[in-house]
Image (cartoon, rainbow, N blue to C red):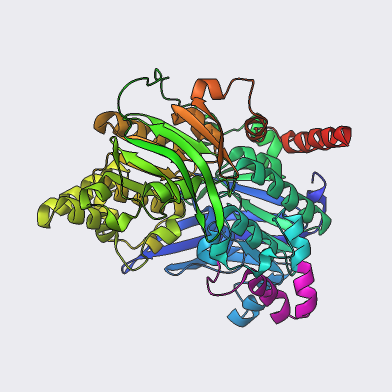
Amino acid sequence: MSESSAKPVLLTMQDIHIDGRSGDTWSPIIKGVDLTLHRGEVIGLIGESGAGKSTLGLAAMGFTRDGCRISGGMIDFDGIDLLAIPERERRALRGKRIAYVAQSAAASFNPAHKLIDQYCEGPVQHGVMPREKAEADAVELYRRMRLPNPEEIGFRYPHQVSGGQLQRAMTAMAMSCRPDLIIFDEPTTALDVTTQIEVLSAIRDIVAQFDTAAIYITHDLAVVAQMADRIKVLLRGDEVEESDTRSMLAAPKEDYTKSLWAVRSYARPVQPPVTTGVPVVSVQNVTAGYGAADVLKNIGFDIHARRTVAVVGESGSGKSTTARVITGLLPPRQGRILFDGQPLPPDYRQRSRDQLRQAQMIYQMADTALNPKLRLRELIGRPAEMYLGLKGKALTERIRDLLALIELEPEKYIDRLPSELSGGQKQRIGIARALAAEPKFIICDEVTSALDQLVAEGILKLLDRLQSEFNLAYMFITHDLATVKAIADEVVVMQNGRVVEQGPKEEMFQPPHDPYTELLLSSVPEMDPDWLTRLLADRAARRAGQG
């Protein structure tokens, strides 16, 4: 990668200005940013939520979301002025020569078509290859992306695979036409650490093999350290600084960049183990699944008031299925769920309104969890109205209080639609909606995965404070072990639907570990550009030695 700057320039963006519309008013989102990208080079865009990373990345395709416009600047892609050519010519480039990997695969796939049909659409329509060859190519790229059963997985619908598998399928689809440029918008956000390693390795290998240039948008500094030749830091639409990756990691110049490097130092105080009292939630010998297959196999653990139990494991290990069982969305085949010592009806439709109120959930995919047609006052207000009976002025005040609690200005945001929010802001609305019911127990399903590290730290502190104030119990589903270290009291490690290890956090991060737990811990990226290369080499050497 180090020689990439000596290669020809592929993309030049000069003095880019992009505005966003709110009502009849246009406000600046990107304020005169420059970007130059050479063939085969990877540039990382980092910054907190709302910095303009995704907006700038989309502009590299000559594209803006609804409600945005490019109001100034020049975009040259391989000698083509993207802002001067007709839209039909820009569309001919998108997918074929410029591809995009979205942050939320679940919101980007068509749920009515199989994965392989959506893969083949691009290369067939662009005339890159016939259908039969495209299908064979899909299997090959599925294999490179480490998807299970690559010959068969393409014939599933999007809802039939996990979030991590869907994200990898989207990455493969973006590469189907072997584009010159790929914009990766948080492509590993939904992935557990072990899968993330495989996907990062596959992306890096394919980018190198096909000499593909990439814009890599992320809030994960350790990930961008493995992927990017250069890093550009954005803040509220302005460029803060840019440098090659090693220089940026070793000696960031600006105070804002230094603050990014210093985050995630938060860790809640260690709590003494709970040995008495009735758990708020008790999962007892639960077996559950879909169709004939068991996804959960005789699992059990307890969650007490004012405690956070982190449930970790690879994509498909059963973490979210456990949440569905607890909330009554998936009745178990065996076992039961106790709430405050009392059995809960297995089906949510059999539960009382108060039982439903007491257990709330914050979903992983904010894009698909929020009704796009409802304004924020309706999204947050509905649970407060339904469960607490609030109306009129009292309801409006509760909505304003919740917006302020999640650090969104009530006057500015209360009447916005989800499409007018960044990914991190949408996730915060999901948190406010769960809090609106004043529950006793909250399932947090990857609630910080879409947030930049500064905002994520603030959210963790907020959740910790709310837990102390209201005696909340949390089940924290996550693949981010840094988050586990920051907020968890106890850890449950799941693999293939079973609990392989559980205990207090301070014990779980100390050896000896179960081999699977050891694999998870060793897969957490470090702020070292050579970490991924070194890890892959070490694992290859171990496999060779075992062979």
Q: Main secondary structure of the magenta part?
A: helix
Q: Residue furthest top?
A: 272
Tell me the residue at 17%/54% (across/down): 396
Specify the quadrant that holds the C terminus. Answer: top right
Q: Quadrant of residue 343?
A: top left
**Vertical placement of residue 249 versus 134, above or below:** above
Q: Picture coordinates of residue 387 (x, y %)? A: 20, 52
Q: Picture coordinates of residue 217 (x, y %)? A: 59, 51
The answer, for residue 28, to whether it is visible in the render is no
Indicate whether residue 330 is drawn in magenta.
Answer: no
Q: Is residue 224 left or right of residue 362?
A: right
Range of the magenta residues? 109-137
**Vertical placement of residue 257 versus 142, above or below:** above
Q: Quadrant of residue 197?
A: top right
The answer, for residue 385, to whether it is visible in the render is yes
Q: Quadrant of residue 152?
A: bottom right
Pick the front one: 68 or 413: 413
**Vertical placement of residue 132 versus 462, above or below:** below
Pick the front one: 457 or 515: 515
Q: Is residue 239 left or right of residue 80?
A: left
Q: Picture coordinates of residue 150 (x, y %)? A: 73, 61
